[in-house]
Amino acid sequence: RGDCDRNLSMQCCDRPKNTNVRISLPAVCFVWQIVMIILFGIFIRYDQESDAHWAEYRKFQNISSDIENDFYFRYPSFQDVHVMIFVGFGFLMTFLKRYSFSAVGFNFLIAAFGLQWALLMQGWFQSLDPMDGKIKISMESLINADFCVASCLIAYGAVLGKLSPVQLMVMTLFGITLYAVDEFIILNLIHARDAGGSMVIHTFGAYYGLSISWMLYRPNLDQSKRLNGSVYHSDVFAMIGTLFLWMFWPSFNSAITDHGDGQHRAAINTYLALASTVLTTVAISSLSQKTGKLDMVHIQNSTLAGGVAVGTAAEFMLMPYGSLIIGFCCGIISTLGYIYITPFMEKYLKIQDTCGIHNLHAMPGVIGGIVGAVTAAAASEGVYGKAGLINTFDFTGKWKDMVPSRQGGHQAAGLCIALCFGVGGGIIVGCILRMPIWGDAPDDNCFDDELYWELPEDEESIPPILEDNNHMRNRDV
């Protein structure tokens, strides 16, 4: 007993003495939701197509049918994107053997937390009505809020298993704020086009998460090495997330593009890039193993890289073969990233990237930004037609004199801004998350649901019953 007490006290002394003041999860959730109710009451209103005055507006605009309401154009894509956010991202991160509750549950928490703040932040920057000072939300606003949350879920992948739920909510709060500013600068001030978010969503989100992971580097994370891995059934669950993401990615990249040819083209380009990535990933994964077998990590993640890289140029005239080339290149780069770059980053750069978001989102996002810049600069009236060129790149209003070569430069500038916001913002937020009040997990308890969840017993402990129990006394006699 004495030895046990002494060992226990030594273990307690080894832990950091910074656990006196901690912000609790219930307090954060309750206070935040009350603040959201107040802010929504002050600022948020329906737009003209979701307001009850739609009937009057329809008559005034000579709109013949309710079917022309934007709901019927956008809702199918919104639902697909919504599934990606809550099911796709959530299940993709269930590969850890003892962190599935947290992967899905905290994904659910920070997505629901973040989309409310995203509606406000994006509304203040993009849909604030100057007449009454109100934010008018629509179906497109909901899609954009999901996009905003997606960038934070990407960042979540880099720190999966290492942060407390309160830290994740703080990371999401700052991430969405930075995203809204970044998005406004890139899309509105610079006038870059980024339909599928290769720059705004993936590049920003990935480097934001990687920078936070770098700031929160744990030299003793090996103490939880036993839990930083998968088992057979956890990889199967993660594959469910992969398939949902893979199937719905064409909707993700085409959700907010212009009705008609732009949306149609974005879906086709994404579809082809994803198909090409799967075959390339399987080939490289098999070639990289001495036995020629496949690595499930590559299949779960690298098969999605083409969807990321084609995002910026999804609505451009890439041509079907161009989409296949993008998918082909990303399958190679992403798979090799898991084999060589991730270990290098952890060993030499001190970046512990749990989900490998550098290979799935960061590098393909940068590739997507470069492809977008090159494709925009090479655009011509011969390929697009005069009206098509104006419509695709939105050369109207103050941008009516823009030419494709200059648009390519603006696209490149947008990529640089996304990188700056991701890295710079991640470093600042990482410093904030290092404060002891957030109650992060100790090094030896990372990647474990038991710290935050009530867990069912793995097996019921039923005492063994001997078949001939009733005859025991007779045997003794």
Image (spheres, grey):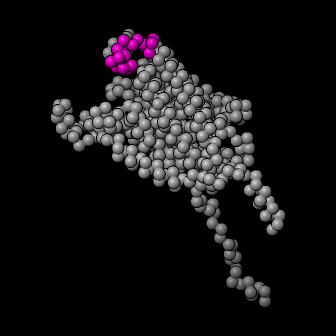
Residue 248 position in % (x across, y down): 45, 37
Q: Looking at the image, which is closer to me, 230 or 281?
A: 230
Instruction: Residue at 80% x, 64% y: name it.
Output: 4
* Res 434 quadrant in image: top right
Was residue 392 drawn as part of the magenta stretch in this picture?
Answer: yes
Q: Is residue 51 left or right of residue 2?
A: left
Seen at 20% across and 35% down, the residue is: 57
Q: Which residues are magenta?
A: 389-407
Q: Is residue 313 above or below residue 465?
A: above
Instruction: Confirm whether the magenta stretch covers residue 149.
Output: no
Percent of width and height locating residue 378: 46, 12
Vertical position of residue 355 compared to residue 22: above or below: above
- Quarter occupied by the N terminus: bottom right
Q: Nearer the viewer, residue 272 or 114?
A: 114
Picture residue at 47% right of the left edge, 53% below the top: 30
Q: Which residue is farthest bottom? A: 477
For the C terminus, the image quarter is bottom right
Whether residue 316 appears in this view of the structure is yes
Dominant secondary structure of the residues highlighted in magenta in the image:
helix
- Asked if residue 151 is positioned above or below residue 399 in the image, the reply reads below
Q: Residue at x 29, y 36 (%)?
A: 132
